[in-house]
């Protein structure tokens, strides 16, 4: 989880991984450290050989629905 820091321009609280300050627009208020954390998180998610998990219940239920539909379809094709 990201830490909260003060923006060097307006002194408002902002996440250290924010791309810019939501108050004044200062680019990268967290500096280089924030960019490195963001890059590391993206690389971890896109590492070769890993699969992306389903992100919501809708996607899980949709996948189950498609699977059941295909099974029923092919059973129907086999019967007729």
Image (cartoon, rainbow, N blue to C red):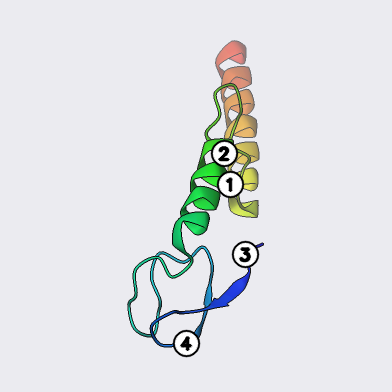
Residue 45: mark: 2
What residue do we see at 65% from left, 32% from top? 68
Separation of residues labelled 1 and 4 (CA atoms) = 41 Å
N-terminal of the pair, mark 1 or mark 4, is 4
N-terminal of the pair, mark 3 or mark 1, is 3
Residue 59: mark: 1
N-terminal of the pair, mark 3 or mark 2, is 3
What residue do we see at 60% from left, 75% from top? 4
Expressed as whole percent of the image width and height from the top left, the position of residue 9 reads 38, 83
**Which callout, 3 or 1, points to the residue nearer the camera?**
3
**In the rendered image, which residue does mark 3 sit on?**
2
Expressed as whole percent of the image width and height from the top left, the position of residue 70 reads 57, 26
Where, by quadrant of the figure, is residue 52 drawn? top right
Please report contact status of discs 3 and 4: CB closer than 8 Å, yes or no: no
Separation of residues labelled 3 and 4 (CA atoms) = 17 Å
**In the rendered image, which residue does mark 4 sit on?**
11
Please report contact status of discs 1 and 4: CB closer than 8 Å, yes or no: no
């Amino acid at each position: 989880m990201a830490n909260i820091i003060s923006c060097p321009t307006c002194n408002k609280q902002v996440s250290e991984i924010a791309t810019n300050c939501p108050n004044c627009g200062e680019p990268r208020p967290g500096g280089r450290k924030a960019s490195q954390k963001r890059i590391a998180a993206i690389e971890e998610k896109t590492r070769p050989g890993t699969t992306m998990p389903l992100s919501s219940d809708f996607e899980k239920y949709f996948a189950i629905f498609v699977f059941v539909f295909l099974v029923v379809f092919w059973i129907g094709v086999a019967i007729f």
